[in-house]
Amino acid sequence: MIPSKRIEIFCGTGGVGKTTLATSRALKLAQSGKKVLLITIDPAKRLKQILGLEKAEEGQVIQLSNEVFGPNSDNISALLMSPKATLQRMANLSGAGEGLDNPIINILTRPYGGMNEIMAIIEVQYQLSTNSFDSIVLDTPPGKHFIDFLESTQKIYQFFDKSFVDIFKYLGKKFTNENEKVKTGLLSLLVQTGVKKLLKYLGKVTGEDFVDEFIDAISGLYRNRMAFTDALAFQEHLKKPEESNWFLVTSVDQQKVSEASGLRSGAQKFMHKDSYLVVNKSLTPYLNAWQPDGSNPSLVKLRDSMKERENAIKGMATEGYKEVLFFPEVLGTEPKSHVNELAQSWS
Ligand SMILES: Nc1ncnc2c1ncn2[C@@H]1O[C@H](COP(=O)(O)OP(=O)(O)OP(=O)(O)O)[C@@H](O)[C@H]1O
Ligand SMILES: [Mg+2]
C-alpha cells in the first residue's frame, strides 16, 4: 500500500470522485489500524450523506461507529468544516473570542462567504497540533475553489499588513491595547474627523448599525491576526514529501485529464513532486476480463479500442507524477458500497 503521511490531500475538478476516494482512503488506513481524521471543506456536504451524519453538528469531530463501514471504521473520525466554529475556537484559544458574534463576521464565515478556505487551513493546522490522529485526510472543494484554498494564506498575510493598521488610525479606533494612544497630527485629525463624518452619514443612510458592526468585525479579526498568520506555517507541511501525500483525482476521460493538468499547474508551487495521479472509474479490469465471442468482430473491436483509450490516458498522464493509480468503476448505486469496494483497491 502507498505509505500514509500526516496529511493526505484529495483534489481535482468537479464530480471525479474526490469525496468517495478520500473516504475510501480513510477507511483503508483505519482498517490497517491507523487513527484517521477525515475532513471535508466542501460545502456540498456529500460526506455527510455517505457517513450517515445528516444530523451531526458541523464543526465537530465525530467518531464513526463500526456500523458505518464494518470493523475498524471506528478508527475514523469525521469533521464537516464550519468556518464559524473554527474561527470561534481559534479566537477563544488566543483569548480574543469576545465580540465575534457579529453580523458581518457571520456573513464572511458562511459557506462561500470568503473565509472558508483560510478557516479550513486553520482547522487542519489545529487538528494536526492535537496529535490525536496518525493521518488527516482532506477532501477539498472542486477546481478553482481548491486553488483559492491554497492561496488563502497569502491573501490573509496581505490583509493584515501595515495598511490595515492605518485604516484603524483613520477610523479613530484603538486597536492594540487600551493604553496606546493613536498619535494624531493636525492633518490626520482632519482626515479622521472627515472619515468619522462620512461614517456617520453612512450610518444615517443605511439606517442601521452597519458602521459600528463593520468596525467591530474588523477589529475582532484584527485581534486574531497572529493565529491567521501562523497558518502560513501549514503550507510548509504541504511542500514536504515526508509530511504529505497529494492525490490529484481525475476520471477516464480526455477532458477530465486535461482539466487535472490545468489544476496541477495552478497548484504546483504549493505541492511537492511526489504526487499521485488517481484515475478513477477505470474500465480496464472489466475489459481485461471480457472475452467477447470471436464470431462477433465488432465487440472485439469495441473492447480493444476502449482498452487503447485507457492506455493512452495512462501514457499522457504519467509525466511528472510519482505514480499513476487506477481505480475501477464500481457497479451499483449505493455510495457506501462504492467506498467499501474502493478501499480494497488501495492495496
Ligand atoms: N470508482 C467509482 N465507480 C463508480 N462510481 C463512482 C466512483 N467514484 C465515485 N463514484 C460516484 O460518482 C459520483 C461523484 O463522486 P464524488 O461525490 O466522490 O465526486 P467529487 O469529486 O467529490 O464531486 P464534487 O466535485 O461535487 O465534490 C458519486 O455518485 C459517487 O458515488
Ligand atoms: Mg466532493
Image (cartoon, helix red, strand yellow):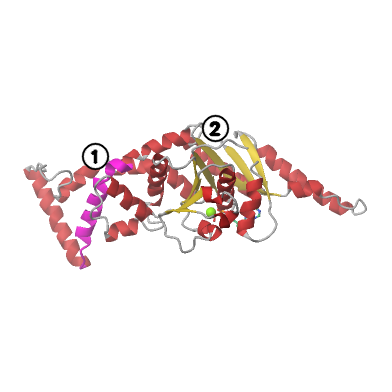
Q: Is residue 346 left or right of residue 183?
A: right
Point out which mark residue 162 bears: 1
Q: Position of residue 80 (x, y in %)?
A: 45, 54
Q: Is residue 230 left or right of residue 205?
A: right
Q: Relative to 274, is 200 above or below?
A: below
Residue at 49% of width from left, 40% of height from top?
134
Q: Position of residue 113 (x, y in %)?
A: 38, 56
- Res 201 → quadrant: bottom left
Q: Find numbered disc 1 in the image and state the secondary structure of the residue it sits on.
A: helix
| Identity of the residue furthest to the right in this view | 295
Residue at 42% of width from left, 60% of height from top?
57
Q: Which residue is mark 2?
A: 273
- Res 158 → quadrant: top left
Residue at 45% of width from left, 61% of height from top?
56
Q: How many marks do you count on the picture?
A: 2
Q: Is residue 94 magenta?
A: no
Q: Which residues are magenta?
A: 207-228
